[in-house]
Each structure stands twice: as C-alpha cells, then as structure tokens.
Amino acid sequence: MSYQVLARKYRPQKFSDVIGQEHVTRTLQNAIAQDRIAHGYIFSGHRGIGKTTVARILAMALNCRSSSGSGSNDKPVLEPCGICDSCTEIRNGNSVDVIEIDAATNRGIDEIRELREAARYRPARDRFKIYILDEAHQITDAAFNALLKTLEEPPSHVIFMMATTQPEDIPQTIRSRCQHFSYRAMKFDDIMGQLREIVAKENIPADEDALALLAEAGDGSMRDALSILDQAIASTSERLTADAVRGLIGSAPATALETVMQAVAECSTEKGSTEKILVLVDELIGEGHSPTHFARQLVRFLRNVTVAKIAGKDSALLQVSSDERARAGRIADLFSEEDLTRHLQIMLRTHGELGYRQEQRFHLELGLLKMAHAQRLLPIEQLLSDVAASSSLPARTAPRPVLASPMEARRNEPPASARSNSVSPFAADSARKGAPKAESSGLCGAGAPARERCDITTANVVIMGSAAPAVAEISPDPRYETAITVETGLAPSPATAESLRDAVLNALGDQPMLVSMLENAEWTLNGNALIAKAAASATMIEMSFPAEARRVAGAAASGLAGRPIKLQVEPGGAQPSATVPRQASTATSYGSARNRAEQDPIVQRMKEKFGAEIRTVIDYREKG
C-alpha cells in the first residue's frame, strides 16, 4: 500500500475522536438520540478543522448497520462502528447512497438538476441517501435557486450536508432551510496535544519547541499543522528540532524578532542607531528569508507583545510556547501600550503593502524605520501642554524647530518659575485618566514643590493664568468628579466686574439669547462671587442658563481672575433704556477680531511650533 499522509491516516472516525468541536458533535449526537434528524445541515468555519470529517461521521452514524448503539439495526447509532459495510464504504468514499460532490467543479444549474432528479429515488441499501456538498459557497445563484424547493421539502430519505469556509456567500434562502453549525478554529493547546500523540505513535523524537512551532504555523488548522509535520519528518532523519522546523517553513529566528524590537527601543536614546536595524534586515534577506513572511512574523510577534503588555505574559490570550511568552514579556517591558499599538499599526500597514509592491525589501526597511522614528516623537498632548504653559511668555524672535527629540525638548523647556500657572490640556487629560498618569506628567510628582502640587479633592476645575479662556472648553467634565488646582505663588491677574463680564460673554458667544440677557445685566464683584442681576424672571434665568453654560462661564471668569469665581445670575435688573450693540461697547478695548487673534500668546506659540496660519476669524460677540 502506498504511503498515506498523516492528515488522512489519523482522520477521526468517530464523534469522540473529533477535538475542538464539542459543541457540534454533542448537538448531533443528541439529535440522533432524540430522533430529531434534520434534512439539511451547513457546516462552516476555518479550513482544516473537521467540517467534511464530521459530515462523513454523521453519515456513517445515520447509516451504520451495527446494533451496539441503539439496540436495533433499524435506527441510527450514536457512534458508528467503523467495521460494517456501510461505514467501510463511506470511509473509502465509494458508497452508493452517500454521494460526495465537489461543488467547486459541479457548481452549475445542470449538475443541480441531475442531483434533484436522483434524489427522488430511494437509497439502494442504506437508510438515507446523503449528499455531502463540499465548498458549497461555489455553487451559482441559479443552481441554488434550482435546489431551493427540493431542499425545503425533500423526500424523507434524503439529507443534505454542505461544508463551506464562506457561509456568507450562501444565499439566505438556503441558510434559513438548514441547521447551521459554525466551527471554531483549533486552539493552540489542542493542536499541541494531537501532535504529541501522533509523533508518539509514529515513534518520531521531537522537541516541544518544534511542536509549538508546528502548532503556531497551523494557524488554527489541524490539517495544516499535520501537513507541515509530514514535511518536517521527511526533512530530517534524526530528532525533530525547532531549528529544522523553522528552516523548513522559512521563518526567521525568534531571536531576530527580539533583536529588531530591541534596536527600535534603543532609537529613543542617544545610543540608538537605525543602522543596526538595516543591518539586521540585510542579514535576514541574505539568508533567503522573504520580506513578506518576515513582516507577517513581526506582526504576530507585536500582537503577542501587546497582549503581554496589557494582560501579562501568562495570559491565556497568548497561544504560544513558554519561550515565546518570556520573549514577549521582555519586549513588552521596553515599550508603553501606546507605543506598541502604534508599532503594530505600522507593521500591519507595511505587511499589507508588501503584497502588491515591487521592491519588497525597501518597503520593509521603510516600515522598520517608521517604527524607529516613532520612538522619537513627542506626544501631541505634550506639545499642546508646552504651548499652554508658555502662553504668558513673550513671543520668541527665532522660531523653535517643529520636531525635536525628547531630550532636546526637556532642555529647551522654560524653568518652573517662568511657567504659566494655567492647567494645560496634557495635565487635565492625565488627571482624567487617573492619579498615576498625573504624577508622571511632572505636575503632580512626589518631588514637586509644595506650591505646585495638585489638589484632586476640589469640586471644580480652577484654571489660572491668561491662557485659561483658551483651554476652558477642554477642562474636565464634572461627571468625572476629578479636579485640578495648581498653586504657583504668582500674583493673580487684576480683575474687575467689567473684565469678568466680558470674559463670561466671550465664553458664551455661541448662545446669542443668553448673551443678550446677560450683557444688559447689572454686574458686581463681591469677593469671589460675580453677581449678574438680569431683567428676567427666575424661571426664565433657570431655563436660559443650563448647567453646562454655568460651568463654561465659571471657568472663564476663574481663569481671568486667577482664583475661583462663583457666578450667580439673579433676577431684579433694571430694564435697559436702549439696546447698545455689544460690538460697539467693546470695540475700543479689544480692537478687531483678527488683531486680537494675532496677538494672542497661544496663537503665536502655535505658529512657532506647527507653522500654523490664521485663515478665518469668527467673533461670536459680534454674532451675539
């Protein structure tokens, strides 16, 4: 007898032999025991996980002539005997009453018409005439329509079984007439256990690392793993090792992946060099490794590293060997979660591009260089924090470079005594994410001076300094119950009732009705209370002044005053004798909107850092 490959030699012959698909086999056995056998089944899922195999086992159980399963040879059995004529013929593929059809080649309407005509006749010997349609999604729509009526009301002796890897391509009218079983991809541990049993039965000495590589290369498919095992056994006459398997499937050494990521991590330091990355790529390609395959390996490795960073290296989400877990854990310690997410995105894009690019090596090198340079970028939150922190300083005559290394940014940072006392967006965002993040931002560190420490117990956000109105819109939401108070010892900005009134009206510029009511109110400043007496009833004030508007107005007034300001709007104001346009009363003190925008310190700093320019200026006070 000619050699039989392992995938066929160790193909399951009973329901109990099927691994990883207990939800399918258990349901089918219960249906047989309860005599609730359907006339149509759809088995869908990943390749090489037992769809056609279970269809054959079900056909053997329905037509088995053994009396051991049910006590009578007139009924189907829970487990086929495997020795009767019916089971033997079905296993060998020459049964008259169990017809396997390759739907990829017999997909037309003529073949389905022949099937429909043959289904009318009773089986020659067995209980049921069973049609197993493999790759059923290849059947044309016209052929499916021809099968529709027969599938809906077939003769009592006919059962259809369809196996497919793409169930979405099967029309809904067909799926609704069948019982649909969705198969699961094989787990790493299940494939490893099956490989151990097979190499033990075949008397093949094999290392655990080699079997782990085979299981990982199978990618959830038992058939793929066994096919590679067959090839690995033929490639070596001695013990099956990890190096032999890696050389067979064309994988780069696991140490190469770790070395590449270590070189990427070093690029954020002064000792790092991108030349090391290019040298490693050159060595791998010189050894015959495919750029596409290496990029795919690196994608899988980065995914494992990201999982190890988030859930720990011992997480069940990592379907790899113990050595790979340790390797992923070591690399996870070198990066933050945000860095790993960015690197994985870069490599996914690179791997996708390699499939249709001509110069694959160049694109692989470009993807690795992108990861290296990503280590040197500053977070946008930190740049915005620098803009807000230095908004009160005079504009620089020489613009700073747009991109700088983290070390240069820290050297060029102004001293603490010269910084503004405003809460930056970076600090506010860190505070919302939790106390540990806020401490790492440098504003709430344990070693910070007492006057610069953050008070997280305050009920409202106190934004101090001239930049406060610009960042009031991104202050923490009250529902987070988190607040920041920064004390610097600097003298607060002088504030009057008129200046606070203008700041509040500016902040509420997108609500013209509310602005119209407040601009004619009588404003007074009594300590930390800013009182506005409007010519409106208490009910009208309550309806026109929602909680969000109160928060924005309070933040704007507090930012300008440099201390907590509580805004109170009360009824009782005098009716205005004449309505004076608001832009006329404030044009003298503020000038034109464009001039104010150009002179704003934050706008000037944004121009320096990002090369920004003013395109459009909208003055909401004029719109009010």
Image: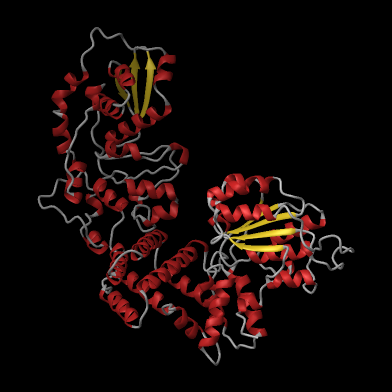
As rendered, which of 172 and 603 lies closer to the eye?
Answer: 172
Q: x, y percentage for residue 42?
A: 64, 55
Q: For this view, does 375 lie left or right of residue 399?
A: right
As rendered, which of 174 and 562 lies closer to the eye?
Answer: 174
Residue 85, compared with residue 438, is above or below; it is below
Q: For this view, does 287 lie left or right of residue 70?
A: left
| Residue 556 placement: quadrant | top left
Tell me the quadrant of the picture where the N terminus can be found.
bottom right
Q: Residue furthest right?
A: 71
Tell me the quadrant of the picture where the C terminus can be found.
top left
Q: x, y percentage for residue 332?
A: 44, 68
Q: For this view, does 185 lie left or right of residue 487?
A: right
Q: Residue at x 34, y 22 (%)?
A: 531
Residue 348, compared with residue 480, is above or below; it is below
| Residue 483 placement: quadrant | top left
Q: x, y percentage for residue 89?
A: 73, 71
Residue 222, compared with residue 496, is above or below; it is below
- Residue 181 shows in this picture: no
Q: Residue furthest top?
A: 577
- The structure's colour scheme is secondary structure
As rendered, which of 367 and 121 lies closer to the eye?
Answer: 121
Q: x, y percentage for residue 418?
A: 22, 50
Q: Residue at x 60, y 88 (%)?
A: 205
Residue 507, compared with residue 19, is above or below; it is above
- Residue 546 shows in this picture: yes
